[in-house]
Image (cartoon, grey):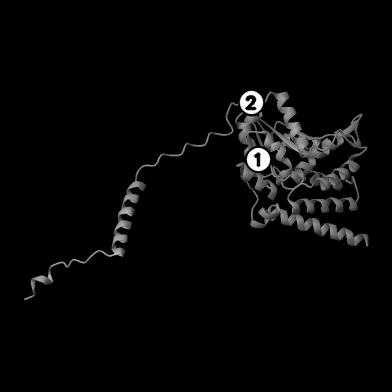
Amino acid sequence: MLPLGWFTRRRRPATAASVLAGEAAAEAARKSTQDAQPVEETPAEPEFPVVGDTAAAAFFDLDNTVMQGAALFHFGRGLYKRHFFHKRDLARFAWQQIYFRLAGSENPEHMADVRNSALSIVQGHRVAELMSIGEEIYDEYMAERVWPGTRALAQAHLDAGQKVWLVTAAPVETATIIARRLGLTGALGTVAESVGGVYTGKLVGEPLHGPAKAEAVRALAAAEGLDLSHCAAYSDSANDIPMLSLVGHPYAINPDSRLRKHAREQGWRLRDYRTGRKAAKIGIPAAAGVGALAGGAAAAVALQRRRR
């Protein structure tokens, strides 16, 4: 027969470890009951764009924001196909596009080189002729390079009953064609001088770049009776910070490194429609960008060899 003491629970003094374990268990029990309580939902973000807000509009940069690459380069390809200039000019355009894609941003000196190249090519040609050709070039080289994500953002503003404008350093004629083909309201772009409907090879003022874009948006908003605090602006480039800073709803789209940093500091919204880590780093679309880059480089090398 077992002694009665065999069934009697022996009392042991609580050690520091057991006290700690007990307190931890009690705290965990309290926390689990608190976590089970219903949590108030965070208020939903206000709908944007606001339907019926006639004081609002949207302003979109073009190159690398709405469309992959530079519109002026694609236009130059189309003009070369139509024998507007020589192979050496095509090689220069190819190199400019390669630089643009690798840099992922707009360098003022580089943009000036592109501008001067374009002006020398169109000098002496009729505006109506270039507009007609521009329609064809859009279908050949530009339509397939429009970012679907950015296009959807623009459409959201249109569906809300708002006007949507392109704002670009590209020639206003080219920008107007692109805006019309995308169903947008219109375009603000660089104005090339023409006399009697013929290009002179000079600009009216300066390229619509950087601070000039902000001034154009400000002027258009005043003329249209818009409230800039209700408006939105979209761009990939830190050069467009003046324009983005004007509006109440700035967006960084496929941003270069400087704009990405600034947007995060300011709490601006970011959207990146490029794919692949390399694309995100250097600012080119992963598949199409690398293919175009390789093709452009190969063309430039081939032309250089032929000249030798």
Quadrant position of residue 270: top right
The answer to which of 239 and 139 lies nearer the viewer is 239
Quadrant position of residue 197: top right
Looking at the rendered structure, the secondary structure element under dot 1 is helix
Q: Is the C-beta separation of discs 2 and 1 under 8 Å?
A: no
Residue 306 seen by the camera: yes
The answer to whether 301 is drawn above or below residue 196 in the figure is below
Which label was assigned to residue 284?
Answer: none
Query: Circle 2 is placed at which residue position?
Result: 55
The answer to whether 76 is drawn above or below residue 159 in the figure is below
Left or right: residue 83 versus residue 62 is right
Left or right: residue 210 versus residue 34 is right
Give the residue at x 85% y 43%. 115
Image depth: mark 2 or mark 1 in front: 2
Distance from Cα at disc 2 to Cα at disc 1: 22 Å
Left or right: residue 29 versus residue 243 is left
Residue 77 seen by the camera: no
What's under tag 1, amino acid-wise?
Arg
Image quarter of the N terminus: bottom left
What's under tag 2, amino acid-wise?
Ala
Which label was assigned to residue 151?
Answer: 1
Image coordinates of residue 33 in percent, x first then y, are 32, 48
